[in-house]
Image (cartoon, helix red, strand yellow):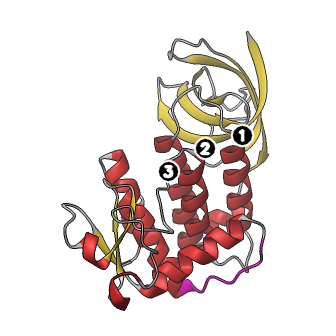
Amino acid sequence: MRYRQPAICLRVSDYSETSQVVAFLTRSEGVVRLLAKGTKRAKSKSGGAIDLLSEGELVFTHSRSGGLGTLMEFSETVSHTPLRRQSARLNSALYLIELAGEMLAQDDPHPEVFDLLHNALARLAQDDAPIPAVVAYFQWRLLRNVGLLGELDRCVGCGSAATGAGGGRGAWFSSTRGGMLCASCGGRADESVRVTGKTVTALAALAAAETGKKVALPDDQAERVKALLSYHITYQLGKCLKLTKHVIGPKRP
């Protein structure tokens, strides 16, 4: 069956001297892996080799068995050239597509994630983009969409509030336990990371933003959330993403 979908290029690898294997996130069909025959030829239907981050109209066929489909045509509509002019923007954009590619299963549609990625890439390309906040919000929404965000409002151990738990001694986060832990429960967890009050405040801001409220997320708070959610993502995937060291700074949650 032939499909026509808006798509974003997530991964590219060489297949032969003239062809590529390309993974796209499509809006209605999810992640698809396609054999792109002849795309490295200058006169190919895609206008040349397909690059990471390219967005456009994709025509393809694929089976539901998880094998390679076939790229019939790709018409690029967004090249994201502005992202390639600054390393911080480019690395952040590449981190977002790597994260999406790792968190989403093949042929599992997530239209909300497609829209989220499309909007995040567009925002990163703008000169006034708060890069840490864009990345933190994308991490948050993606984890929420795939059901892995966890409990961030209350302690998963005893049910007490995440803020002010344990007599103001702060809180902890455990990826394996599935969310926040109060100071008392956090000390008994086999795996956890300490979370500061600034991070808890930033998480509350993201929750408010998710409901449509306009909130400010200063770079300092956004960096802390990025670090916390990256920690969580690493545990959930069982590995550290390649772009993590370029995007997640040294700041602790």
Task: Name the main secondary structure of what is drawn in magenta.
Answer: loop
Q: Residue at x 30, y 78 (%)?
A: 183
Instruction: Give whichever of 43, 227 is nearer the camera.
Output: 227
Could you tell me the amino acid type at mark 1?
Pro
Between the residue at mark 3 and the residue at mark 2, the CA separation in whole angstroms equals 17 Å
Q: Which mark is residue 111?
A: 1
Q: Position of residue 11 (x, y in %)?
A: 52, 40
Q: Is residue 241 visible?
A: no
Q: How many marks?
A: 3
Left or right of 47 on screen, residue 236: left
Q: Is residue 34 visible?
A: yes
Q: Quadrant of residue 80?
A: bottom right
Q: Position of residue 172 (x, y in %)?
A: 33, 73
- Labels 1 and 3: the sequence-earlier one: 3
Q: Nearer the viewer, mark 1 or mark 3?
A: 1
Q: Residue at x 26, y 76 (%)?
A: 184
- State whether residue 112 is above or below residue 215: above
Between the residue at mark 1 and the residue at mark 3, the CA separation in whole angstroms equals 16 Å
- Labels 1 and 2: the sequence-earlier one: 2
Q: Is residue 23 magenta?
A: no
In the image, which residues are magenta?
213-219
- State whether residue 155 is above or below residue 3: below
**Helix or strand or loop: what does disc 2 sit on?**
loop
The residue pinned by badge 2 equals 51
Left or right of 24 on screen, residue 242: left
The residue pinned by badge 3 equals 99
